[in-house]
Image (spheres, grey):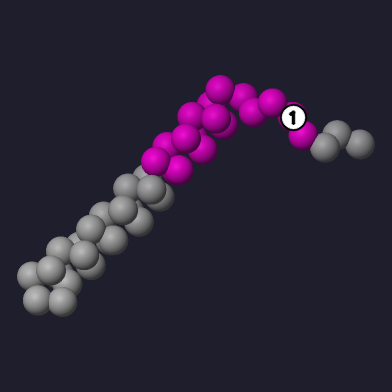
Amino acid sequence: MELSRRPSEEEFNLLLKLNLLGFTVVGGIAYIIHLASVLLGG
């Protein structure tokens, strides 16, 4: 039974892009929420 394998370069690049996109989206949302709370005097 094969438990794990080394990802191909194409698969690795796709996962890398998806992870970076996810981090960017989550960070952007957190920044907007923080900015809104500061501007509203929270």
The answer to if 37 sits in the magenta stretch is no
The location of residue 19, given as percent across then percent down, is 45, 43
* Above/below status of 29 relative to 7: below
Quarter holding residue 3: top right
Q: Please, which residue is most extreme toward the top here?
A: 9
Please tell me whether mark 1 sits on a helix, a strand or a loop.
loop
* Nearer to the camera, 40 or 24: 40
Give me the residue at 86% from left, 34% from top: 2
The reply, left or right, for residue 39 in relation to residue 9 is: left
Q: Quadrant of residue 18?
A: top left
Q: Residue at x 77, y 34 (%)?
A: 4
Q: Position of residue 39 (x, y in %)?
A: 8, 70
Q: Could you tell me which residue is drawn at 62 percent across and 25 percent down?
A: 8
Provide the residue designation for mark 1.
5
Q: Residues within 10 Å of mark 1 (few under 14, many from 20)?
A: few
What is the total number of numbered labels drawn onto the structure image?
1
Observer-nearest of 24 and 30:
30
26 to 24, vertically: above or below: below
Instruction: Please determine whether, in this image, residue 27 is positioned above or below residue 9.
Output: below
Q: Is residue 18 magenta?
A: yes
Residue sitting at the far right: 1
The answer to whether residue 30 is above or below residue 10 is below
9 sits left or right of 42 in the view:
right
Tell me which corner region of the image, top left, top right, bottom left or bottom right, holds residue 37: bottom left
Magenta residues (range): 4-20
